């Protein structure tokens, strides 16, 4: 075509013909130029003809993934094939079958995961939630467990009960009323003495070492920490400790966590059984050895403790009543019960001592 | 007349000859090559969005990634989906527009991301916390030669929140404290390889003395892609109550360690601080609670493990790289796949 055009340009033609040929050539060139510059129009169907080899390779990949059991990758490729071949009924049927299969498997693993989570076995539950995602990658509940609920809780929720104060809540949850400041540090509390019943408070789920009455175990013999530009030697020593801890942690962390989870689960069941037999003090003692962020332990501790306090108050009042009616034996029994429920009750201790002394004097007379 | 000048009797005038030649060139050019051919297809419900394309002359994986995914660095997405390393004209490909293998989760395992931690660097002197220039350069070269891709913390958190795919052998590079060696030695090497990294500074150290960074240097690093984040104010161990402290004093002090570092870095660099590296890698729930309260999105320990997507974002593992590590030891810290949680 090029040589034809060049020949036309060279050949001596009459002026008018030459001009019209040139005009035509210019017009054609302009059209071609514009068409080359214009955005490429979207290629219409038939897509099948355009992407035959692509469809073939997608099909063989999809079958390969299916054979390997990687159903989500298979399904993804069948989905693309369906879009490329919208009238292929075999593909549509295959997709339906795979979707049904993946949904069923995802549901089975998810249910198992929830059951294991409820039993306090986080590692086993995690495995089941991961399998749920293998079959249904966007399963929202499985994702919620994996990304949120299976992590150690930093906060627990506490619902304010009638008569609660910050110090009282701190005593119940942290066994230390002086930690009451933590409530106002993480909640908008106008008055620690007048908390509104029913209000939900965010409480830090302190690690056991920090939650007890005693100083945290980490607190032992730590001089003032390394300050600005601390001597390199001191820093190096401490970092070596970190390194060693890291190495040790890597080897045994998982079994320890798993073991802890099993213990929590066992203790939790035992505590519930004790509560069923109305053995509140024993149940509370057991509950306080469980991680405070394990299931609803914090809530059960709070309600059990409140129940024990009410019981102790009632026995104390009965003791006073017996004492005033000069029935010392009954008064002593009531106050002994108060001390069983509330061993650090100073008033009950004092009254019991007085009652015993008085009884001794009467006996001597 | 002018027309006679351009219209000699014996042939076409030179003006029109030139014009005609120009048109011819344009005509041939128009026929020669069009842009990549692609098809927008109606999307089946539940199917990720994708574009099928036919590779044209001059197309490369990075050029297709730049055109369809908005970033040439994302060429690995096209390569991985189509299981190809190179492409040739006429080849038909799928360009996935949405994540197609988040966390690379299958019954065989899942992706994990190792986060490497350095402290200081020197020309020749080696120490536990000091890596020699030659060793650091060799380690970065090892990453490049073996298909590892350093990613930023923002990309890491996309992975941790199960939002996006990340490269198959993604790693994160972090540097703690704020020693001068970061500027003199690590930065030029990172720049040469084009690797992102994060510098966790404890702000009391940034005073521009001979051994430490100045705020000007820190600002320069941050601007150049070394993301600066917090490592507390004084580098105190946040998990230890000091002998003379009451619990309340301890709580107040550790919150100040976090908030003062945040305020200083934010005011010096005019950016939002989102991540913290725990000094000595130690933490507890109270520290994490203060981080959440102060808007932090994640924090880092020094537990020597890689990170799957379901890690607690406030207890991310990091692997400390020491000055006496051989390349073989370094390699052992690059675990990017695991099946542990599926067993």
Image (tube, rainbow, N blue to C red):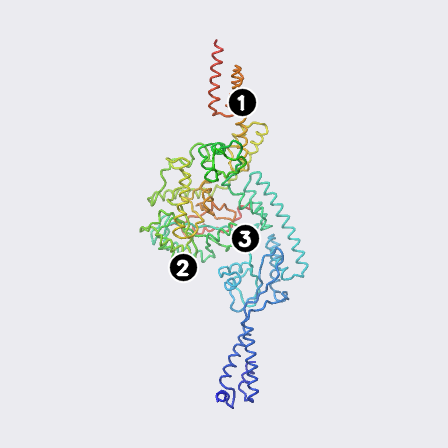
| Residue where numbered disc 2 is placed | B192
Indicate the secondary structure of the residue bearing disc 3.
Answer: helix
Asked where in the image residue A283 lies, by quadrant, the reply is top right
* Up/down of A274 relative to B209, above or below: above
Judging from the image, mark 2 belongs to the subunit labelled: B
* Up/down of B95 relative to A119, above or below: below
Check disc 2: other Cα within 10 Å, few if <14, some if 14-19, many if 20+.
Answer: few
Q: CA distance from mark 3 to mark 2?
A: 30 Å
Front label number (1 vs 2): 1
Tags 1 and 2 touching, CB below 8 Å: no
Residue A315's tag is 1
Residue closer to the observer: A42 or B130: A42
Do the residues indicated by labels 3 and 2 lie within the same chain of the protein?
yes
Check disc 3: other Cα within 10 Å, few if <14, some if 14-19, many if 20+.
Answer: many
Residue closer to the observer: B218 or B136: B218
Indicate the secondary structure of the residue bearing disc 2.
Answer: helix
Residue B277 % position (x, y): 42, 47
Q: CA distance from mark 1 to mark 3?
A: 62 Å
Do the residues indicated by labels 1 and 2 lie within the same chain of the protein?
no
Q: Earlier in the sequence, mark 3 or mark 2?
A: 3
Q: CA distance from mark 1 to mark 2?
A: 79 Å
Q: Quadrant of the N terminus of chain A?
A: bottom right
Residue B73 % position (x, y): 48, 60
Tags 1 and 3 touching, CB below 8 Å: no
Indicate the secondary structure of the residue bearing disc 1.
Answer: helix
Horizontally, is A358 left or right of A59 in the view? left
Can residue A214 be seen from the camera position used here? yes
Horizontally, is A287 left or right of A71 in the view? left
Residue at the far bottom: name it: B9
Residue B102's tag is 3
């Amino acid at each position: 075509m090029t040589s034809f055009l060049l020949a036309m340009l060279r050949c001596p033609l009459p002026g008018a013909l030459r001009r019209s040929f040139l005009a035509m050539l210019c017009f054609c060139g302009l059209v071609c130029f514009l068409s080359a510059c214009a955005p490429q129009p979207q290629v219409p169907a038939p897509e099948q003809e355009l992407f035959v080899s692509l469809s073939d390779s997608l099909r063989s990949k999809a079958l390969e993934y299916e054979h390997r059991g990687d159903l989500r990758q298979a399904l993804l490729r069948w989905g693309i094939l369906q879009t490329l071949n919208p009238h292929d009924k075999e593909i549509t049927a295959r997709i339906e079958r795979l979707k049904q299969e993946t949904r069923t498997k995802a549901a089975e693993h998810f249910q198992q995961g929830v059951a294991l989570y409820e039993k306090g076995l986080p590692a086993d539950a995690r495995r089941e939630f991961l399998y749920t995602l293998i079959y249904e990658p966007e399963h929202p509940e499985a994702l919620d467990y994996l990304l949120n609920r299976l992590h150690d809780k930093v906060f627990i929720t506490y619902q304010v009960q009638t008569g609660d104060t910050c110090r009282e809540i701190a005593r119940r949850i942290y066994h230390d009323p002086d930690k009451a400041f933590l409530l106002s540090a993480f909640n908008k509390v106008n008055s620690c003495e007048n908390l509104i019943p029913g209000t939900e408070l965010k409480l830090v789920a302190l690690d056991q070492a920090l939650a007890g009455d005693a100083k945290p175990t980490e607190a032992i013999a730590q001089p003032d920490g390394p300050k600005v530009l601390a001597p390199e030697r001191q820093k190096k020593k401490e970092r070596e400790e970190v390194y060693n801890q890291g190495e040790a942690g890597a080897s045994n962390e998982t079994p320890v966590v798993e073991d802890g989870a099993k213990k929590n689960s066992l203790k939790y069941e035992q505590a519930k059984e004790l509560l069923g037999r109305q053995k509140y003090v024993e149940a509370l003692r057991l509950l306080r050895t469980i991680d405070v962020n394990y299931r609803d332990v914090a809530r059960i501790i709070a309600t059990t403790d409140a129940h024990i306090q009410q019981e102790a108050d009632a026995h104390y009042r009965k003791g006073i009543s017996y004492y005033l009616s000069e029935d010392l034996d009954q008064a002593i029994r009531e106050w002994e019960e108060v001390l069983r429920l509330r061993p650090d009750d100073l008033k009950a201790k004092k009254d019991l001592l007085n009652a015993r002394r008085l009884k001794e004097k009467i006996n001597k007379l | 007349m002018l027309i006679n000048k351009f219209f000699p009797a014996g042939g076409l005038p030179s003006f029109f000859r030139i014009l005609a030649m120009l048109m011819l060139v344009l005509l041939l050019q128009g026929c020669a090559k069009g842009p990549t051919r692609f098809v927008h297809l109606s999307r089946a419900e539940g199917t990720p969005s994708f574009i099928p394309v036919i590779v044209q002359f001059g197309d490369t994986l990075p050029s297709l990634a730049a055109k369809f995914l908005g970033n040439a660095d994302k060429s690995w997405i096209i390569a991985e989906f189509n299981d190809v390393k190179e492409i040739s004209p006429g080849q038909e490909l799928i360009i996935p527009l949405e994540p197609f293998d988040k966390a690379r989760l299958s019954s065989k395992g899942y992706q994990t991301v190792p986060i490497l931690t350095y402290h200081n660097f020197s020309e020749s002197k080696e120490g536990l916390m000091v890596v020699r220039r030659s060793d650091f350069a060799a380690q970065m070269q090892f990453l490049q030669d073996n298909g590892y891709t350093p990613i930023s913390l923002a990309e890491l958190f996309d992975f941790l929140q199960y939002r996006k795919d990340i490269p198959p052998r993604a790693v994160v590079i972090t540097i703690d404290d704020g020693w001068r060696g970061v500027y003199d030695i690590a930065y030029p090497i990172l720049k040469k390889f084009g690797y992102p990294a994060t510098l966790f500074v404890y702000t009391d150290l940034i005073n521009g003395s001979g051994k430490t960074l100045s705020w000007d240097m820190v600002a320069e690093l941050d601007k150049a892609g070394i993301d600066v984040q917090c490592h507390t104010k004084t580098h105190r161990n946040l998990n230890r109550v000091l002998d003379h402290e009451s619990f309340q004093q301890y709580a107040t002090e550790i919150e100040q360690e976090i908030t003062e570092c945040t305020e200083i870095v934010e005011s010096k660099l005019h950016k939002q601080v989102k991540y913290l590296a725990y000094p000595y890698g130690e933490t507890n729930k109270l520290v994490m609670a203060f981080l959440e309260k102060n808007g932090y999105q994640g924090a880092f320990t020094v537990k020597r493990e890689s990170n799957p997507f379901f890690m607690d974002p406030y207890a991310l593992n990091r692997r400390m790289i020491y000055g006496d590590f051989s390349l073989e030891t370094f390699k052992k810290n690059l675990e990017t796949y695991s099946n542990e949680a599926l067993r």
